[in-house]
Amino acid sequence: MGLYATAMEAIEAYTGLSPAAFFTISAAMVVVYKIVCSMFVDPEELDKKPIDARSSIATNQPAPQPQPPTIREPVQLGDVTEEELRAYNGSDPNKPLLMAIKGKIYDVSGSRMFYGPGGPYALFAGREASRALALMSFDPRDLNGNLEGLSEHELEVLQDWEYKFMEKYVKVGQLVGTDQAVNGGKVEESEKHD
């Protein structure tokens, strides 16, 4: 009984709490820790299917291993019209997810959760989104490459977006056949396609 009494006195002396309060708080901390840890699951664990003990034991065969997701290399498209670009809006899961900024087409398939169907930026997929990005607009009427009438600040915002895309995504082509003002209000000769 001496060890128990010594431990209770030590708890009270070092923590300033009664032993009952100390153990209650300790138990609550363990429960909170377990709850918080359960919120963060290793992504590989999410992909694993639950093991069906009956099938793997009964057939004496190993349980099937989950296949890693296939990562496709970006496909270089070259010159693409705006109409052709619309086919890459995420509606076909076998096609890459593309969008254009200032006439340059980027493969944003790696961010399907943002640009794919149901994502917060799905509106931009398969479209030339320069004006919408410059204005930070989700208005479908702004989904074009027309930079006329944009302020200096809006053009800077667009330039920041372009730098982010250049850093994060692979350029896979360029828009052709557009008469809209791009690249600061001028249409480059390579973009005119009569």
Image (tube, rainbow, N blue to C red):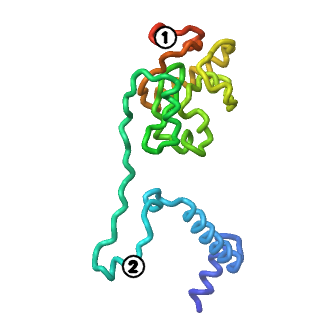
Q: Which residue is mark 2?
A: 53
Amino acid type, label 1? Lys
Q: Is residue 172 above or below residue 89?
A: above
Taking depth in this image into account, of 78 and 115 the one nearest to the observer is 78
* Label 1 crowd bin: few (<14), some (14–19), many (20+), radius 10 Å: few
**Circle number at residue 109:** none
Q: Is residue 45 above or below residue 136?
A: below
Q: Secondary structure at mark 1?
A: loop
Label 2 vs label 1, nearer the camera: 1
Left or right: where 182 falls relative to 56: right
Q: Earlier in the sequence, mark 2 or mark 1?
A: 2
Residue 121, position as x, y percentages in the image: 60, 37
Residue found 53% across the figure and 36% down from its top: 89
Residue contact between numbered discs 2 and 1, judged by CB atoms under 8 Å: no
Q: Is residue 100 above or below residue 93?
A: above
Q: Which residue is mark 1?
A: 192
Res. 36 image quadrant: bottom right
Taking depth in this image into account, of 157 and 49 the one nearest to the observer is 49
Res. 153 image quadrant: top right
Amino acid type, label 2? Ala
Residue found 46% across the figure and 45% down from its top: 93
Tell me the distance, in whole angstroms, between the alpha carbons under discs 2 and 1.
63 Å
Taking depth in this image into account, of 30 and 80 the one nearest to the observer is 80
* Label 2 crowd bin: few (<14), some (14–19), many (20+), radius 10 Å: few
Q: Secondary structure at mark 2?
A: helix
Residue found 38% across the figure and 44% down from its top: 71
